[in-house]
Image: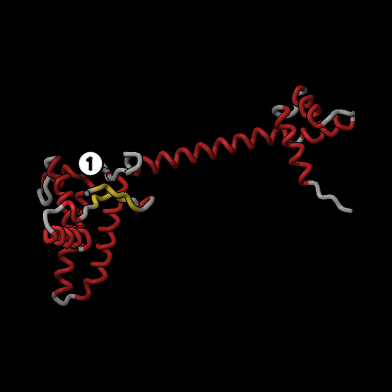
């Protein structure tokens, strides 16, 4: 029975339809489908062909065509991070890679370094498209959107922690001295913390107690 299977985590997370022999009329049909899927998903040429088709569809949906002068002019009006610009850049780079592959196959081995560089760039553009356009399976939101929101959350969290540390720093210096004075006068630690706070020293009684015990832990005693 066909079922949806999710594998991997983070950037490697992916989902696919898993079938077994019960989904096919005969063992022969099952075997043919298995090897067709294996070839389609594992041979880089087929993967690039699928990407090429997808990128061409993106351009055509916007009335644009690779190699057309007017289309090239209009493409440059899109943002560098738009799907249109990324699709166009992938197609141009892919065409260059194919051309270089043909030259190398004909014995022009000096083109190999250029071919390697273009192939690396093709992968970079593909990765950019993945982040920009692909959807996270568990949330249904674009992966880049999740990355940006996560970054903003971390920044706000760090800023808040820094602010809290700064607020504590204003009071920390006076709290132990005032509490020691009150304790020497006969007050318990809890009362000293509360009274100090009521006198405007420290944020509150609970915070003052925390500062007191934290400072006491830092004191090194010698026999």
Res 95 seen here: no
Colour scheme in use? secondary structure
Residue 93 quadrant: bottom left
Residue 12 locus on image (x, y percent): 35, 53
Residue situated furthest top in the rendering: 198
Residue 162, how many percent across, how many down?
59, 38
Q: Position of residue 192 (x, y in %)?
A: 81, 28
x and y percent of residue 153 in the render? Answer: 47, 38
- Which residue bears the numbered disc 1? 78
In the displayed structure image, the side of residue 89 where residue 141 appears, left or right: right
Q: Residue at x 77, y 45 (%)?
A: 217
Packing grade of label 1 (10 A; few <14, some 14-19, many >=20) is few
Considering depth in this image, is 195 or 2 the residue closer to the camera?
A: 2
Which residue is located at x 27 percent, y 64 percent?
Answer: 117
Q: Residue furthest bottom?
A: 107
Q: Residue at x 52, y 38 (%)?
A: 157
Residue 14 appears anywhere in the view: yes
Asked if 170 appears above or below 122 in the picture, the reply is above
Quarter where residue 150 is shown: top left
Judge left or right: residue 206 versus residue 11. Answer: right
């Amino acid at each position: 029975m066909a079922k949806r299977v999710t594998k991997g985590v983070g950037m490697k997370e992916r989902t696919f339809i898993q079938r077994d022999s019960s989904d096919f009329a005969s063992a022969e049909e099952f075997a043919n489908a298995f090897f067709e899927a294996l070839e389609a998903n594992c041979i880089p040429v087929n993967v690039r062909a699928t990407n090429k088709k997808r990128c061409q569809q993106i351009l055509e949906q916007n009335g644009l065509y690779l190699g057309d002068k007017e289309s090239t002019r209009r493409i440059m009006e899109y943002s560098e991070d738009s799907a249109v610009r990324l699709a166009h850049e992938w197609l141009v780079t892919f065409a260059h890679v194919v051309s270089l592959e043909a030259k190398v196959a004909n014995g022009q081995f000096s083109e190999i370094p250029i071919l390697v560089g273009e192939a690396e760039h093709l992968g970079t553009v593909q990765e950019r498209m993945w982040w920009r356009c692909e959807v996270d399976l568990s949330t249904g939101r674009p992966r880049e959107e999740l990355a940006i929101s996560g970054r903003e959350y971390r920044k706000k969290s760090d800023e808040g922690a820094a602010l809290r540390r700064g607020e504590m720093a204003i009071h920390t210096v006076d709290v132990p001295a005032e509490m020691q004075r009150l304790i020497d006068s006969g007050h318990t630690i809890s009362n000293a913390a509360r009274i100090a706070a009521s006198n405007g020293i420290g944020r509150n009684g609970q915070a003052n107690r925390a500062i007191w015990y934290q400072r006491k832990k830092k004191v090194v005693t010698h026999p």
